[in-house]
Image (tube, helix red, strand yellow):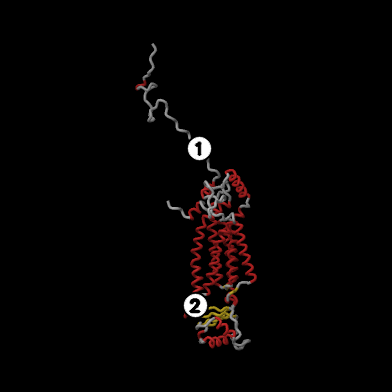
Amino acid sequence: MAREGLATRLYRGEVSYDFIGRRRRWYAASLLLLLISILSIAIRGLHPSIDFKGGDVFQFPRNSHSLQDVRTAMAAVGVTPEVAQITGSGSASRFRVETKSLPQSKNAPGGDVVGNVENQLVSALGITKSDIDVQSVGSTWGSQITKKAVTGLIVFLIAVTIYMSFRFEWKMALSAIVALLHDLLITAGIYSLVGFEVSPSTVIALLTILGYSLYDTVVVFDKVRENTMGIIGGSRMTYSQAANLAVNQTLVRSINTSIIALLPVVGLLVIGAGLLGAGSLKDLALALMIGLASGAYSSIFIATPLVCDAKEREPAFKALARRVAARQAKDGSAVTTKAAAPTWGGQQSATVPTATAVLDEAGDEPAPAKPTTPAAGPRPGSRPGGQQRRGGRGGRPGGRSNKRKRR
């Protein structure tokens, strides 16, 4: 018989990991990441792209020159590039230089600075003026995008809270919202630490990861609700134990979904941004990669433990926990099938129940089996085959008696 896979053993509860019992570790790790993210945003801040702050963009062929040559040429006319990068590869590679808004009129203070920059680039890099593409970007468009994104985020959070309150309960909805904010803060903090620009592509990616993080959380919550349905009337496991079983049952699915979703995103980041030099793809791919990984983490290590902390404070589940503890003390072992379910690493867990226990939890104790009446033995005078002799008491045909008549 072939050995069953890890996914099957996790689903049946034959092997498990105590995610809920170790939730303090996950809380501590998340608090540390959130603290680093908040400090980085407060001290270093985010780096908005030119779409949000406005300015001028110069794009021109590379012509076998380096970024230092471009900076030197622009410094000669008193202009300091804010962002200078190379886009494309091979013969199609180009410089993309962003500056603050520069005067373009000869009557403006300082004269036509944009024209001076173009003339200096032509003489220093050996290109023609027609090769230089200059774009002026205003900050109005970026501010409008920001306002619409914030409005969409607020509407999304309200809709999610209402839906999950009706679909599950308000405690699960609140835990899901906390997990979403956790993912957003960590993504923004990593953006601040790395120093990547926040562009409209970043905003789109942030709104995208909200949906993915919520999807992963709903999958886990649905299994938690299934495992905890009717659990109050029993004494086999606590709410946290049933929720931990649900997390183990959906663990492989969460990992597989996350890996499949991350593979194309990593391809965008490595090929699109690294090899092709597409800056917009870099902004989109980085936010998606961080958000997808954080969403998979929060659905398992943050959202579900928060629900357990909230539910275990209810009087009904406190009473259930006391009954489970009393039963385990009486039995002298944890609630498992015949032995404690082994955890990863060869150890055994005394707190993780099996799937069979969850299925039996709707009714408290299984009804005792009715005693069966032992089979009656053969009657006196019957034949070995179970057939009774014909005749009277003497067993002779005709029912004649063997007794002698008294004279």
Disc 2 from disc 1: Cα separation: 80 Å
SS type, badge 1: loop
SS type, badge 2: loop
| Residue 28 image offset from top left, x and y in percent | 62, 60
- Image: 143 above or below 29: below
Say which residue appears at 55% left-offset and 88% top-offset.
119
Say which residue appears at 51% left-offset and 51% top-offset.
14
Q: Residue furthest front?
A: 346
| Residue 45 image offset from top left, x and y in percent | 62, 72
Task: Name the mark on residue 370.
Answer: 1
Q: Residue 291 versus residue 106: which sits nearer the camera?
A: 291
Q: Residue furthest left?
A: 397
- Image: 208 above or below 345: below
Q: Is residue 328 visible?
A: yes
Q: Is residue 228 visible?
A: no
Q: Residue 66 versus residue 391: which sits nearer the camera?
A: 66
Indicate which disc, 2 or 1, sits on the residue closer to the N terminus: 2
- Image: 17 above or below 94: above
Task: Name the mark on residue 4.
Answer: none
| Residue 24 image offset from top left, x and y in percent | 61, 57
- Is the C terminus in the top left, top right, bottom left or bottom right quadrant? top left
Task: Name the mark on residue 88.
Answer: 2
Amino acid type at mark 2: Gly
- Image: 208 above or below 88: above
Say which residue appears at 52% left-offset and 78% top-offset.
86
Which numbered mark, 2 or 1, is in the foreground of this view?
2
Dot 2 crowding, Cα within 10 Å, few <14, some 14–19, many 20+: some
Left-right relation of 380 to 64: left
